[in-house]
Image: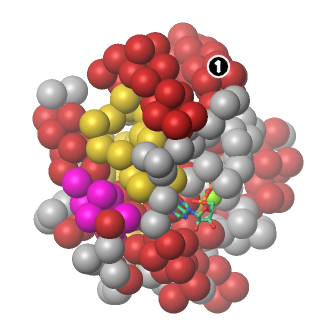
């Protein structure tokens, strides 16, 4: 059965999608069977995995509305090395449509359960909000990976997410826990970043992943080629850090 993880942080531009596609590619590289679920109507994880969001016949939208199964709607990205349940702008409508439906926050959970035996890891790229879509992700996950930049307001922004995770844990999904905080876009030359990094470790202890993802331009360039950085330039510092992170995740899961 697959282990299911949400990559979540309610802030935009913090590195969720970059983390999702590169962790997926890193896991694929070390022999894991991976499905990426794009839960963001922007469809960046879809495009960044080499799947054209404008050409999707079926997407995560159809899965949430139960008009398609994961097996029917997923696509394989040959280049990236994993499967993708894609998203595009249509998904923005699901937010409103789901409100009317029963089991509205458990739709994805039900759908993924049927596909779980086909994968070792399912990674869900969440939108930058604590919305019904994110709630669907949190309801089916075993854990949350939180990418964060070591900046001044980082800790403050974290408390909303931590509270949401606690509520979901209490009411909807007793399995849910924070697997770890991932420091991304890290620049060791910046004193403030080192200070915030130390604060994070003091506050969250071993919930902070050992791996640190550096700021690396190759990671930022890769999406325009429809590739995760890990595939686009495997020798880059950013790619190597994500492969290290994939190995760290595999180790952490073994002790879960
Ligand atoms: P989110 O999904 O949280 O909105 P993204 O993953 O799209 O965030 O990242 C926001 C921007 O930062 C993107 O342009 C991305 O290419 C860039 N980026 C993310 N991680 C890195 C990194 N480690 N080094 C350099 N640029 C990065
Ligand atoms: Mg994103």
* 210 versus 170 height, above or below: below
- Residue at 28% in and 77% down: 234
Q: Which residue is mark 1?
A: 159
- Give the residues drawn in magenta, as a range: 238-244
Q: Secondary structure at mark 1?
A: helix
User: For the C terminus, which image quadrant?
Assistant: top left
Q: 238 and 43: which one is in front?
A: 238
- Residue at 28% in and 50% down: 245
* 87 versus 214 height, above or below: below
**Residue 110 in sight here:** no
Position in image of residue 24 (x %, y %) = 35, 62
Left/right of residue 13 with respect to residue 18 in the rendered view: right
Q: 200 and 24: which one is in front?
A: 200
Q: Is residue 242 one of those drawn in magenta?
A: yes
- Residue at 43% in and 24% down: 198
- Residue at 38% in and 83% down: 232
Mark 1 surroundings within 10 Å by alpha-carbon count, few (fewer than 14), some (14 through 19), many (20 or more): few
Position in image of residue 125 (x %, y %) = 54, 54
- Total labels: the figure holds 1
Ligand 1 in which quarter: bottom right
Position in image of residue 28 (x %, y %) = 24, 67
Position in image of residue 108 (x %, y %) = 54, 47
């Amino acid at each position: 059965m697959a282990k299911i993880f949400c990559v979540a942080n309610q802030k935009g531009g913090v590195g969720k999608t970059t983390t999702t596609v590169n962790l997926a590619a890193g896991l694929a590289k070390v022999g894991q069977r991976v499905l990426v679920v794009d839960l963001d109507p922007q469809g960046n994880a879809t495009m960044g995995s080499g799947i054209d969001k404008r050409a999707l016949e079926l997407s995560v939208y159809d899965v949430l509305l139960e008009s398609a199964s994961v097996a029917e709607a997923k696509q394989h990205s040959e280049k990236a090395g994993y499967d993708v349940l894609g998203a595009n702008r249509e998904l923005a409508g699901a937010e409103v449509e789901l409100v009317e439906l029963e089991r509205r926050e458990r739709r994805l959970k039900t759908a993924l359960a049927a596909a779980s035996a086909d994968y070792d890891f399912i990674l869900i790229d969440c939108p930058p909000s604590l919305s019904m879509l994110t709630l669907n992700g949190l309801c089916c996950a075993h854990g949350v990976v939180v990418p964060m930049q070591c900046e001044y307001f980082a800790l403050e922004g974290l408390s909303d997410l931590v509270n949401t995770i606690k509520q979901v844990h209490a009411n909807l999904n007793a399995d849910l826990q924070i697997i770890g905080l991932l420091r991304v876009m890290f620049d060791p030359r910046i004193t403030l970043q080192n200070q915030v990094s130390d604060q994070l470790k003091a506050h969250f202890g071993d919930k902070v992943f050992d791996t640190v993802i550096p700021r690396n331009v190759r990671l930022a360039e890769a999406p325009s080629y429809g590739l995760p950085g890990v595939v686009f330039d495997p020798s880059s510092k950013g790619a190597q850090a994500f492969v290290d992170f994939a190995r760290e995740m595999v180790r952490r899961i073994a002790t879960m």
